[in-house]
Image (spheres, rainbow, N blue to C red):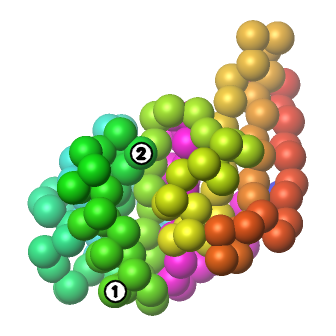
Amino acid sequence: MAMLKDIARLDEGRIMITGNGKRLARIYLDAWLRRGRRGVAEYLPFQINGEMFIGPPFESEDFDVYLIVNPLSKSVDEKERLYRWLEEHPHKLVLLYETKYVADSITRYRIRQFIDYLIAYKWETAGFERIDVMKLEEGRVVERKTYVRRR
């Protein structure tokens, strides 16, 4: 659980949660907002506890936490704009929430160059949850941990 707790304590970085891990995303956003941070989201695909502004995240510098929804499903132009924004703002705390499941295949996506952690959530048919957490540096996985929880 150390890597998951480390992510909750981050002051800056880019975290991507894939596989429709709403509960995990909510936990992280709540933890960050509880520390007095201001957040902005394109829209909220789930309910959170705390104050989150809704609006275009790329147009404001005044926020501490940013929620970008479905970055892999965006158009080519929107992806380029996102990558440019991530490159220009390396010290922001950004949660990239993707409903599509992506784990090891992250190496096929350019976004891997911009994220620090990938959390791949999967609900297995055998009645358990699997969470793969990967720490990335320069687009390469440098640390990996898998957590399993029976439901």
The spot of residue 80 in percent (x, y) is: 29, 63
Q: Give the residue drawn at x 36%, y 85%.
A: 89
- Magenta part of the chain: 3-27
What is the CA distance from the residue labelled 1 to the residue labelled 2?
19 Å
Report if residue 51 is visible in the image: no
**Residue 103, position in %: x, y?**
69, 43
The mark that comes first in sequence, 1 or 2, is 2
Q: Is residue 90 left or right of residue 78?
A: right
Depth check, front residue: 71 or 39: 71
Seen in the picture, residue 95 relative to 70 is either above or below; the reply is: below
In the picture, measured across the screen, residue 69 lies left or right of residue 135, that is: left
Amino acid on which disc 2 is placed = Leu
**Residue 122, located in which quarter of the rendered image?**
top right
Q: Where is residue 36 in the image (x, y as percent from the top left)?
A: 38, 80
Residue 136 placement, left or right of 12: right
Q: Mark 1 points at which residue?
A: 88
The image quarter containing residue 46 is top left
Q: Residue at x 40, y 81 (%)?
A: 87
Q: Residue 72 carries which label?
A: 2
Establish if 85 lies above or below 82.
below
Q: Do the residues labelled 1 and 2 touch (CB within 8 Å)?
A: no
Residue closer to the observer: 9 or 102: 102
Q: Is residue 90 above or below residue 54?
A: below
Which quadrant does the C terminus fall into?
top right
In the rendered view, would you say 99 is above or below 144? Answer: above
Looking at the rendering, in which quadrant would you find the N terminus? bottom right
**Of helix, strand and loop, which one carries label 2?**
helix
Residue at the location (75% across, 19% down)?
A: 124
- Does the magenta segment cover residue 26? yes
